[in-house]
Amino acid sequence: MTKKPSGPVLGTRALNRATLDRQLLLRRSPRSAQDAVAHLVGLQAQNVKPPYYALAARLDGFAPEHLARPMADREAVRIVTMRSTIHTHTAADALTLRPLVQPARDRELTYFRTGLAGVDLDRLAGLARDLVEAEPRTMAELRQALRAEWPDADPQSLAVAARCRLPLVQVTPRGLWGRSGQVALTTAEHWLGRPAEPAPTPDATVLRYLAAFGPASVKDMQTWAGLTRLRDVFERLRPRLLAFRDDSGAELFDLPDAPRPDPETPAPPRFLPEFDNLLLSHADRTRVVPPEYWGRAWRGNQPFRTLLVDGFLAGVWKLEEDALVVETFGRPSRAEQDGIKEEGERMLAVMHPGTPYDIRFGTVVAAQ
């Protein structure tokens, strides 16, 4: 008979405020961009701009060059890690977290096995490493070079196999604010000038996850990391953790000294980018996304930039040629609208100084 979780109940608002605090979204932090990227265990970065907007919402005194500079100096990089998605990480995390999540990349590779029939994957990885360390290569260049060795294999599958087997980073100027550049790849070890380090223990990564996203369940952690079978890790750590329950009875774990603010702590409006990890790193997202708004921050596979009001998803936003357009799901009060406008003005001053934008409240987004 399965033992039911015990421990105090943390309601939705309590979870919301605890997570916002750790995500540096209750009040802006004086941390440096690099320290924030490390604390948050990376920023999802399918597109170039989201990490910059993510830090603008979280850091006091942030300017885009505060992230662009360490990327140009190879102190931060863009690399595929959690959930098999591109993240901006510190150099140290790029060299350790990628080995930790390698099992997820190996699972991804199984989807391409038909196109890789007869391909020696160890030989492919060695050849691909030689190619990208000789000079950064685009995926098209990798496809072409690898197809010369395996003409009967699927070219796209060959390039994906290289990306799955090797810790490939996107070299700059890709990823720099205000710069453009195609995606060109080399290995993390070559770009950073030092060998990969041993993967951190799952235990250490669980503790970091809780510090940035907790309180959280085992399923939450697995969703964030794209890994499975982490129950044993949490059980091993149980003596060092506190246990809670959410409103549905699911067991949550947390660090004893982590902040758990009063549920009524004010949460100012925040403009978040598409792909912000706040909305992607829990199996149960109701701590941030009200059930009635589930799915409304996405259209197909494309996420919108999102707006938080009182700590919860409340709308989406976009930049048009001359305006910041805010579309709320409900009707904000006059005080909320004033707060949204003030936060929007601040975001524009940080991210687009000197550019004249109006702020317009658009029509309410229809349910998806």
Image (cartoon, rainbow, N blue to C red):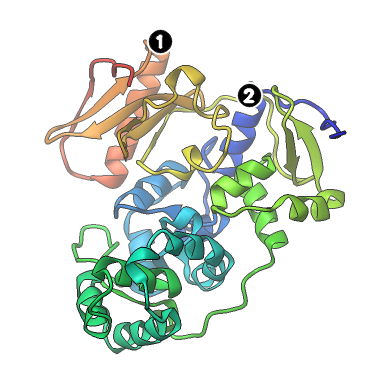
| Residue 146: quarter of image | bottom left
Secondary element type, mark 2: helix
Can residue 154 be seen in this snapshot? yes
Q: State the residue in front, 56 or 126.
A: 126
Q: Which residue is mark 2?
A: 12
User: Which residue is situated farthest in the left direction here?
Assistant: 321
Of the numbered discs 1 and 2, the one sitting upstream in the chain is: 2
- What residue is at 68 percent from the left and 44 percent from the top? 218
Using a 10 Å C-alpha cutoff, classify the residue at mark 2 as few (fewer than 14 neighbours), some (14 to 19) or many (20 or more): some
Q: The disc labelled 2 sits on which kind of residue? A: Thr
Q: Which residue is mark 1?
A: 333
- What residue is at 39 percent from the left and 13 percent from the top? 332
Q: What quarter of the picture does the C terminus occupy?
A: top left
In-image side of 34 versus 184 (left or right): right
Q: What quarter of the picture does the N terminus occupy?
A: top right
For residue 221, above or below residue 252: below
For residue 15, above or below residue 225: above
Residue 98 percent across, percent down from the top left: 52, 68
Residue 287 percent across, percent down from the top left: 58, 29
| Residue 131: quarter of image | bottom left
| Residue 87: quarter of image | bottom left
